[in-house]
Amino acid sequence: MPTSTAVTDRVFTIPNIVSFARLGAIPVFLWLVWQGYDLAGFIVLVVAVSTDFVDGLLARRLGQVSRLGQFLDPLADRLFIAAAVVALAMRDVIPLWLLALVLGRDVLLGLGALVFSRWSVGMLPVKWLGKWATFALLFSLPLFLLVRVFDTAAVYLAPFAFSLAVAGVVLYWWAGFVYLFDAVRLARDSVSSTPRRSATL
């Protein structure tokens, strides 16, 4: 079985198709939650969370690591997390502080990307800290929805969902600051490597 980790420019790979499917599931999930089909929304969210680990695994196992996939996978994660917290907060499934902390971190990184693009700081490689943060958040959100579906299980699931959400938010912000510090370092390296113009002609 191929295990090559060479990065290609291919677009239509199995991992990328999985990532596209995860993106396509976002409006489906939003519609289901908005219409009150919580159990169906829970199922879609769980399937989407599962694909987050499938596409990366397939990319490595099949030797289909691509530049598009390196961009598409974290983008799909961030969009799904953002869409999920907004939809669940509007339904009072999750607390507003969770919505504010998750979106606040994404806004901070988005502004940072705009600022550091001036120094040609492109997309930073995904770190394991960020992966664990994404895992915790994506795992906690279906639990919150499951609490809404099965009220009798709330006493058991709610504390676990809250604990996992808090851990996810802490890791999410921690990873965000790590990315910002890396961007600052790369920007400084870019400035120091740029030849200075002579003061005289």
Image (cartoon, grey):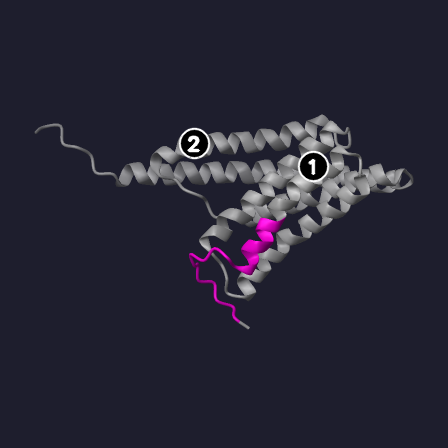
Foreground residue, 37 or 153? 37
Determine the image quadrant of residue 121.
top left
Q: Residue furthest left?
A: 201
Percent position of residue 82, x then y: 63, 35
Residue type at mark 2 is Leu
The C terminus sits in image quarter:
top left
Determine the image quadrant of residue 174.
top right
Which residue is labeled 1 in the image? 30
Q: Residue furthest right?
A: 152
In the image, which residues are magenta?
2-21
First in residue order: circle 1 vs circle 2: 1
Q: Residue at x 71, y 45 (%)?
A: 45
Which residue is labeled 2 in the image? 114
Category of crowding for the residue at label 2, using alpha-carbon neighbours closer than 10 angstroms: few (below 14), some (14–19), many (at least 20): few
Number of numbered discs present? 2
The dominant secondary structure in magenta is loop
Q: Residue at x 52, y 36 (%)?
A: 177
Residue type at mark 1 is Leu
Going by the image, does 154 lie left or right of 76?
A: right
